[in-house]
Image: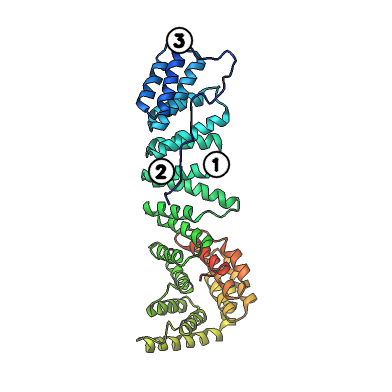
C-alpha cells in the first residue's frame, strides 16, 4: 500500500526568462554560476555547490542575480539530495514575484516529493500541505501526505487525511480505491480504534465485497463488549447470513435468543434454514437440537393462538416493546401490513433504545419481503456499539448478497 511512484520534477538553472530587459548577470555572479552548471552536468555536486556559494557571496547583487543564484542552488541541492538546502532555495523562489504561479506549484511539488523520497517525513508533511493548499487536490500528493504521517507512526493524522479524501470521493459519487480503504482500516487498527476500523471495513464490504472483509466485520462487531445484549441476536443472524456462523451450539444459542425475545416463529425459521443447510441435525448434538426444535414449535403454536389478543393489548400499553414484539409476530405470521403498522405505533411510543427499535423494524420489513422499504429504514439507523454497523451490513446484504 506504500508503493507510490514519486519523482522530483527537474529544476534546471535559468529556466525562467528575465522579467525585465535590463535583467542580466554580472561577470562576478555569472562566471561562478556557469562553473556550477558545468559541475552539475558532470554530477560533481560538491564543486557545483561551492561555485553557487561563491556567486552568492558576491556583494551588491541585483534582485535578478539573487533570484538566479537561488535557482541554481535549488537545482544542485535537489539533484544531490540535500533536502534542507533545496527547501531553503525553493522558499526564496516561491516567495519571489518573478516566479509564475504554475512554476511555484511545480517547485512546491518538487520540494515536497524530494523530502518524501529522502524519508524526511517531518519536512515532507508541511511541504505537501503547502502544495495542496496552493494548488488544490492532487491524488498522488494526497497519498504521499497520508504515507508521510503513517511512516512517522502518526496514525491519527494519517487516518484523518485518508478519511477526508475518501469522504470527498464518496460525496462526488466516486468509488474510493480498495487501497485507500485498506490503508484507512490499517490506521485505525494501529490506533486500536475498533469502531472506526469497523466502519472502514463496512466500506470495503460495500465497494469490494469479499469474504475476508465480512469475516473481519463480524469479528470486530463481536469484539465490542459494549454491544447491548438486545443486539446480540441480530449479530448472530448476521453471522449466519454471511456464512460465519459454524458451530451448532451457536445456532442453538441464536434460536434460544429468538424465543427469549418473544419471536419463536423467527427462531423456528432460522432453525429450519440451519437444518436445510446441514448445520444442524447431523452432529453429536442432534438429539438435543431435536428437543429444542420441538419446544420452539410448541412456542410458535402458543404465540399464534393469541396473536390478536397480544396485538390488542399492546396498542393500549404506553411502552413500546409490546407493540414492537406483537407487530413483528404478525409480520412473521404473514400479516405484514398489520404487523408493520403496529410496530410503527411502537416506534412512536419512544422506545428505550430508539436506534435498536428502528433496526428491528427494518429487519421485520426484510423478513416480510419488503426489502426496498427495509433498506430505506436501515439507512436511517445510527448509534454506537453495533446498531448503525449492523444496519449498514444488513443493507449491504440486501442490496448485494455476499457470495
Read off the residue under disc 3: 60
**Residue 338 pos. (x, y %):** 64, 76
Q: Is residue 319 visible?
A: no
Per the rendering, the mark at residue 257 is: none
Per the rendering, the mark at residue 137 is: 1
Q: Secondary structure at mark 2?
A: helix
**Residue 11 pos. (x, y %):** 48, 30
Q: Secondary structure at mark 1?
A: loop
Q: Are marks 1 and 3 in contact (CB under 8 Å)?
A: no
Q: Nearer the viewer, residue 154 or 5?
A: 5
Q: Nearer the viewer, residue 281 or 322?
A: 281
Q: Is residue 379 left or right of residue 237?
A: right
**Residue 246 pos. (x, y %):** 40, 76
Determine the residue positioned at 49% across, 49% down: 163
Determine the residue positioned at 39% across, 14% down: 57
Q: Are marks 2 and 3 in contact (CB under 8 Å)?
A: no
Residue 366, compared with residue 84, is above or below; it is: below
Question: Looking at the image, is mark 2 or mark 3 nearer the viewer?
Answer: 3
Q: Is residue 289 left or right of residue 104?
A: left
**Residue 403 pos. (x, y %):** 51, 71
Read off the residue under disc 2: 149
Q: Nearer the viewer, residue 335 or 236?
A: 236
Q: Earlier in the sequence, mark 1 or mark 2?
A: 1
Q: Quadrant of residue 333?
A: bottom right
Q: Quadrant of residue 82?
A: top left
- Cα–Cα span, label 2 and label 3: 43 Å
Q: Earlier in the sequence, mark 1 or mark 3?
A: 3
Q: Quadrant of residue 48?
A: top left
Mark 2 is surrounded, within 10 Å at the Cα level, by few (under 14), some (14 to 19) or many (20 or more) other residues, namely many
Q: Is residue 331 visible?
A: yes
Amino acid at each position: 500500500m506504500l508503493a507510490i511512484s514519486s519523482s522530483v520534477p527537474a529544476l534546471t538553472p535559468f529556466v525562467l526568462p528575465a522579467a525585465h530587459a535590463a535583467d542580466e548577470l554580472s561577470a562576478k555572479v555569472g562566471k561562478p554560476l556557469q562553473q556550477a552548471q558545468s559541475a552539475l552536468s558532470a554530477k560533481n555536486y560538491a564543486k557545483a555547490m561551492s561555485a553557487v556559494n561563491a556567486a552568492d557571496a558576491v556583494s551588491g547583487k541585483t534582485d535578478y542575480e539573487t533570484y538566479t543564484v537561488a535557482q541554481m542552488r535549488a537545482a544542485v541541492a535537489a539533484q544531490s539530495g540535500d533536502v534542507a538546502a533545496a527547501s531553503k532555495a525553493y522558499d526564496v523562489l516561491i516567495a519571489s514575484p518573478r516566479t509564475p504561479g504554475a512554476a511555484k506549484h511545480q517547485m512546491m511539488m518538487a520540494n515536497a516529493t524530494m523530502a518524501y523520497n529522502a524519508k524526511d517525513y517531518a519536512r515532507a508533511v508541511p511541504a505537501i500541505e503547502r502544495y495542496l493548499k496552493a494548488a488544490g487536490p492532487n491524488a498522488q500528493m494526497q497519498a504521499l501526505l497520508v504515507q508521510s504521517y503513517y511512516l512517522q507512526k502518526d496514525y491519527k493524522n494519517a487516518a484523518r487525511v485518508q478519511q477526508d479524501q475518501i469522504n470527498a470521493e464518496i460525496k462526488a459519487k466516486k468509488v474510493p480505491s480498495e487501497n485507500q480503504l485498506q490503508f484507512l482500516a490499517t490506521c485505525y487498527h494501529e490506533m486500536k480504534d475498533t469502531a472506526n476500523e469497523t466502519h472502514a471495513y463496512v466500506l470495503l464490504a460495500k465497494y469490494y465485497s469479499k469474504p475476508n472483509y465480512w469475516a473481519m466485520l463480524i469479528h470486530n462487531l463481536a469484539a465490542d463488549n459494549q454491544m447491548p445484549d438486545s443486539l446480540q441476536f441480530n449479530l448472530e443472524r448476521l453471522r449466519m447470513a454471511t456464512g460465519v456462523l459454524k458451530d451448532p451450539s451457536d445456532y442453538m444459542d441464536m434460536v434460544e435468543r429468538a424465543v427469549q425475545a418473544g419471536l419463536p416463529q423467527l427462531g423456528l425459521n432460522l432453525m429450519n434454514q440451519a437444518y436445510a443447510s446441514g448445520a444442524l441435525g447431523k452432529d453429536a448434538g442432534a438429539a438435543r437440537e431435536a428437543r429444542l426444535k420441538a419446544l420452539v414449535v410448541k412456542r410458535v403454536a402458543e404465540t399464534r393462538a393469541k396473536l390478536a389478543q397480544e396485538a390488542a393489548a399492546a396498542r393500549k400499553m404506553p411502552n413500546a416493546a409490546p407493540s414492537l414484539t406483537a407487530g413483528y409476530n404478525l409480520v412473521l405470521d404473514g400479516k405484514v401490513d398489520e404487523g408493520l403498522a403496529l410496530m410503527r405505533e411502537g416506534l412512536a411510543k419512544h422506545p428505550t433504545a430508539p436506534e435498536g427499535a428502528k433496526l428491528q423494524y427494518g429487519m421485520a420489513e426484510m423478513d416480510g419481503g419488503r426489502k426496498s422499504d427495509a433498506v430505506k429504514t436501515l439507512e436511517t439507523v445510527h448509534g454506537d456499539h453495533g446498531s448503525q454497523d449492523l444496519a449498514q451490513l444488513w443493507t449491504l446484504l440486501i442490496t448485494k448478497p455476499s457470495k
